[in-house]
Image (cartoon, grey):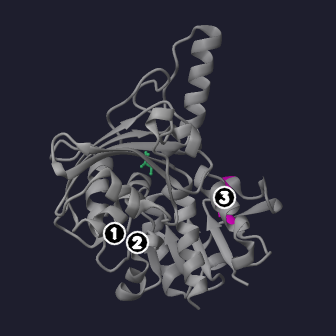
Amino acid sequence: MAKIAIVGATGAVGIELVKCCHARKAVFGDAPPALFASARSAGKVLEGPYGPLTISEFTLEAVQGKFDYVFLAVSGSFSEQFAPSLASSGCWVIDNSSAFRYHDTVPLVVPEINFSAIKAIGGKLIANPNCTTAIAAMALWPIHQAHGGIKRMIVSTYQASSGAGEPGMQELLEGSKSQLLDGKAPVNKVFSHPLPFNCIPMIDKLQGNGYTKEEMKVAWETRKIFGDDGIKLSCTAVRIPTLRAHAEAITLETAGEITPASVLECLRGKPGVAVKDDPGNDVYPMPLSCSGEDDVQVGRIRQSEVFGDRGVDLFVCGDQLLRGAALNAVLIAEKLEGDK
Ligand code: 2RA
């Protein structure tokens, strides 16, 4: 039975990690994961599918060498400080921060796509991708494989408040309530502007090229996960007032011919992907219909007016806390466990 630790257990991703482990009790065993967080949260009790679990204060000594899998749902600076020591103590460390995603010596993994990178690169530290990248990658990888490779892509995102964690979700709910019930303008602390009834075309820090870091993450990480530095990708990342699922409009050009039918054919039956493409009957991916769902939804698939027989447009939606974070991490551990 696998021994599992979740560090950063009180956050939105930490809570989903507990649920995802519980859903895979057949793989990991009945014992609940050990939960760790900062001293401030130590002693708190988390109610979840295993029943009440008490949070312990994280120390390196309490975790290193004592677990098979350590999930880190913490800040990049925390991961930078502790992840390498945890990994060299023999634990598999799956890090949800961006601290190691661009290191050549650390695999960046979506298990359905490039699980083999773990053995190829070696080491026990694995980076979990940014949510926006992981969600799109699930839909794009089968298309990339079946059409001679994706050459160019334009991505526009519609990102939920959960990308800023539980405080982001609370700010959206409370701001909406105060506007609707009290007629008061929403207050913003987490987001740089009020999110209710708004959209904010700026996520993460501005880079020297005028894109934000969130936008560049989609380009950098897609290339690394697909093992193809030639993919050209331009992204506009926008925060919208939804709770926990990201949506992405994608226009892409492939090397080979592509049609909506060939896209449907390569997506059907792929694990982790659900085709929702019957627009005449109002069936398409939406944040509400994929919230709490493991599968990434793909729909509105159409021949591109710009790229002709080498291009399609499509719409993708995925739960930000699941495929975009906790589920992807737990699926990596599940595959490692199966590989033993
Ligand atoms: C966001 N991508 O949506 C981030 C979270 N990882 O803000």
| Label 3 residue SS | helix
> In this rendering, would 67 be left or right of 265?
right
- Is 37 within the magenta? yes
Query: Which quarter shows the C terminus?
Result: bottom right
Q: Quadrant of residue 62?
A: bottom right
Q: For mark 1, does the 10 Å Cα neighbourhood hold few (<14), some (14 to 19), or many (20 or more) residues?
A: many
Dots 1, 2 in contact, CB < 8 A: yes
Residue 6, image x and y in percent?
A: 64, 67
Instruction: Left or right? Give the position of 307 relative to 252.
Output: left
- For residue 290, the mark is none
Q: What amino acid is at disc 2?
A: Ile
- Mark 1 vs mark 3, foreground winner is 1
> Can residue 7 be spotted in the picture?
yes
- Assign the N terminus to one quadrant of the image: bottom right
Q: Amino acid at mark 1?
A: Ile
Circle 2 SS class = helix
Q: Please provide the residue range marked out in magenta.
A: 35-40
Report, in whole angstroms, how far the alpha carbon at label 1 lies from the one at label 3.
35 Å
**In percent of the image, x 42 and y 61: which residue is there?**
267
Q: 217 left or right of 185? A: left
Is residue 251 among what the camera can see?
Answer: no
Q: Residue placed at 33% from the left, 48% from the top?
A: 214
The local secondary structure at tag 1 comes to helix
Q: x%, y% of residue 122?
A: 39, 88
User: Does the segment drawn in magenta span residue 127?
Assistant: no
Q: Which residue is mark 1?
A: 225
Which numbered disc covers residue 113? Answer: 2
Q: CA distance from mark 2 to mark 3?
A: 37 Å
- Looking at the image, residue 205 lies above or below residue 141: above
The numbered mark, 2 or 3, whose residue comes first in the sequence reads: 3
Q: Earlier in the sequence, mark 1 or mark 3?
A: 3
Q: Which residue is mark 3?
A: 39
